Amino acid sequence: MQTTYRCVGVTGAGAMGRGIAQIAAQAGSIVRLYDTQPEAVARARDELFAQWDRQLEKGRLDAAAVAGCKARLLPAQRLQELADCDLVVEAIVERLDVKRALFAELEQIVRPQAVLATNTSSLSVTAIAAGMQQPQRFAGYHFFNPVPLMKVVEVIAGLRTDPAVCQALSAFAREMGHTPVLAQDTPGFIVNHAGRGYGTEALRVVGEGVADFATVDRILRDQVGFRLGPFELMDLTALDVSHPVMESIYHQYYEEPRYRPSVITAQRLAGGMLGRKTGEGFYRYLDGKAQVSA
Ligand code: NAI
């Protein structure tokens, strides 16, 4: 299988990095997966191997495909091991300073023609690229959680991005079975801007005592037809990701009241009740299933 990018580096082996690594390996690319926490890479590898084994059992992938995926997923101990990558997708913590520092380092490591991309949910692609030597090869590549199931990816051009980079990223998205959507570099891009009210208004409903969060979820899921209620979605995304996204969009729109983050999520974030990934968010989770309201 020949893909647009023969070798893809993924930095950050959390929920998003793991998913991006999965679909890139399934498309036929070699994937080098790096995280500052080596145990995150080991965990991601174990989970992906188990995932592929399940797909084999269910007959969705044959034995040769599964063996190929496993062989193409290469855990990296050091960032330098991404030197031969044609594309590096960053899916690390949502902080401008940390992302900028990573790309400054990556520019010293990868070849000049390699493409660099960020999976940021809310930061400006142009701002992340501000200190880069070659900002024209840098773009936003915003996947959704869980990556293999959510088949859309926003491809975002910063002010200095070469349009050819967005075209190549779009072609690669199609090879991975995803639908690329071109978006401008504005706060929240398309989905996190258009979908803002889903979380913030639900938090207001709860904050004003109109209904509790489980009721809001139940109505919006079972009666209105959303796949997940807003609080279930926040538990899936995790508050250490979604609360900073709310803050970032609010500040980028000059404290627009519609986007004001909630003290409810700020308090839960401070208390470490992040969602599924900590076993406790708005709901408590046992074996990955919501059990009771937390
Ligand atoms: P996560 O917390 O699950 O994983 C982040 C990983 O990055 C951690 O394993 C951490 O050790 C690692 N990391 C932190 N700094 C690093 C560095 N300097 N170099 C290498 N690895 C580093 O986070 P998640 O949810 O995967 O989010 C990652 C990015 O994707 C964020 O920018 C987030 O805004 C974005 N995003 C998240 C979505 C979600 O629903 N969780 C959806 C779409 C985008």
Image (cartoon, helix red, strand yellow):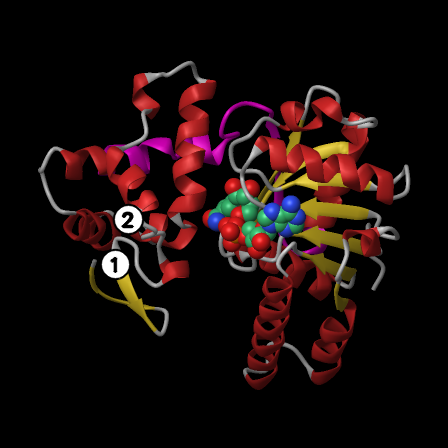
Q: Secondary structure at mark 2?
A: helix
Indicate yes or no whether the magenta region holds residue 187. yes
Q: Residue at x 60, y 81 (%)?
A: 53
Query: Residue 34's quadrant in the figure?
Result: bottom right
> Is 100 left, or right, of 255 in this rendering?
right
**Marks 2 and 1 in Cβ contact (< 8 Å):** yes
Q: Amino acid at mark 1?
A: Tyr
* Whether residue 181 is situated above or below residue 46 in the rendered picture: above
Q: What percent of the width, then of the height, locates residue 62?
A: 68, 81
Q: Which mark, residue 231?
A: 2
Q: Which mark, residue 142?
A: none
Q: Residue at x 75, y 21 (%)?
A: 160
Q: Amino acid at mark 2?
A: Phe
* Whether residue 66 is situated above or below residue 149 in the rendered picture: below
In the rendered image, is residue 166 in sight? no
Q: Label 1: few (<14), some or many (≥20) within 10 Å?
A: many
Highlighted range, magenta? 174-202
- In this view, the residue in front, 292 or 5, is 292
Q: Residue at x 58, y 69 (%)?
A: 43
Instruction: For marks 2 and 1, give the one nearer the viewer.
Output: 1
User: Quadrant of the image for the N terminus?
Assistant: bottom right
Q: What percent of the width, then of the height, locates residue 81?
A: 83, 56
Q: Label 2: few (<14), some or many (≥20) within 10 Å?
A: many
In the rendered image, is residue 257 in sight? yes
Q: Residue at x 42, y 50 (%)?
A: 237
Q: Secondary structure at mark 1?
A: strand
Q: Residue reaching furthest top?
A: 254
Q: Which residue does the numbered mark 1 point to in the structure image?
A: 283
Q: What percent of the width, then of the height, locates residue 29?
A: 78, 60
